[in-house]
Image (cartoon, coloured by chain):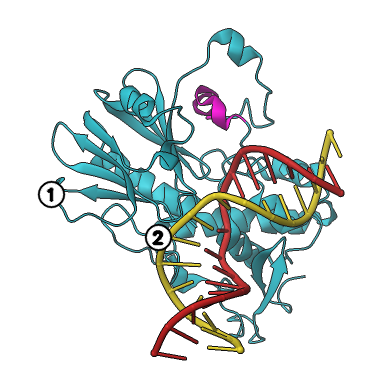
Chain colours: A cyan, B yellow, C red
Amino acid sequence: MPELPEVETLRQDLSKEVVGKKVKAVAVTNGRSVRRHKTAKAFRDLLEGRTFKSVGRVGKYLLVGLDDGNTLVIHLGMSGQLHRAKSAKEPKIKHTHVTMTFTQGGDLWFVDPRTFGEMFVSVPLSSEEQAALPVSFAAGVEGAALRRQVHELSELGFDPIENMLSWERFAVVLRQHSVQLKALLMDQHAIAGIGNVYSDEILFSAGLRYDRLSDSLSTTEVRRLYRAMVEILAEAIKHRGSSLADEQYVDLEGKTGSYQQFHEVYDREGLACRRCRSLIQKAKFQSRSTYFCEHCQI
DNA sequence: ACGCCCGCCTGTAAGC
DNA sequence: TGCTTACAGGCGGGCG
């Protein structure tokens, strides 16, 4: 479940913990986690001996800049975790699929029970190859250089924290499609980083139903949605993300986030809406659960 | 061409 | 009590 706020929390911690560290050894114990590479050895060879220079993020992707110009890309999928181990002797965590050991000491582990997550090293394309790429609508906005460097991510939409559009341009994105709001918020090609949890929280905060069509909003409603998106995500980052009962999101040190205590709708079916006291509803939307307040969201 | 939905996975928990 | 089944969902790909 890690979405933008959880990934951003990890990005902040990683930039303190691993920037400047040199990778001594990489062990892959489940090849599925590095499935974009032909072999686990190909992945290892691109990482061993490299030094981590920076840690960026686009949407739900972590981008670790390497000293040779390549980028280590990490996506946590549903159940991925990164764990900072003090040493390789620490008790193993079940479902640890990739282990990195640093020359300065300490380990970074990639743990992922459901194996939807992945890691890969992205090598920049030649200028001819790059010219042949389809230009995503977000290209040209601030920060697009980072995205172009990782061509695998060239199709991602704008990041609402790193590269938020003006509300007027956001209105254009909404009017470009005629799609239900929750689908648009979760569409990574349009907006990068929002998943099932935060889409519900943003829509409640904006007072809009999940099934309202994106091109049906008044100017006031567009502004409310814009404000809700920025505020909810920023607030969630401040509280180090959400840790839910089954998802078990934890940070590098194994600590949970605390934003779940501020959730207004997600996983609150049958509980009273804190704004109007009517009961929070649960519905199926595109074979996914959706929580909302029938009274507060129109 | 585009939108929907399955398959990939495992752990947890409800239900019979 | 113990087994089976449903559910959780990000994302790529396939099908309609």
Whether pointer 1 and pointer 2 mark residues with C-beta atoms closer than 8 Å, the reply is no
x and y percentages locating residue A16 in the rendered image? 26, 41
Residue type pointed to by label 2:
Tyr
Labels 1 and 2 share a subunit: yes
Q: Secondary structure at mark 1?
A: loop
x and y percentages locating residue A62 in the rendered image? 43, 39
Q: Which residue is mark 1?
A: A89
Residue A149, placed above or below residue A189: above
* Distance (Cα) linking label 1 and label 2: 23 Å
Q: Which residue is mark 2?
A: A249
A122 vs C12, nearest the viewer: C12
Residue A21 shows in this picture: no
Residue lying at 66% horizontally and 68% vertically, measured from the top left: A290
Residue A175, placed above or below residue A48: below
C2 vs A256, nearest the viewer: C2
| Magenta region includes residue A153 | yes
Precedes in sequence: disc 1 or disc 2:
1
Task: Magenta stretch: give its range.
Answer: A142-154
State left or right for residue A158 relative to residue A37. Answer: right
State left or right for residue A223 relative to residue A1. Answer: right
Residue lying at 52% horizontally and 71% vertically, measured from the top left: A263
Location of residue B4 (image quadrant): bottom right
Residue lying at 65% horizontally and 85% vertically, measured from the top left: A279
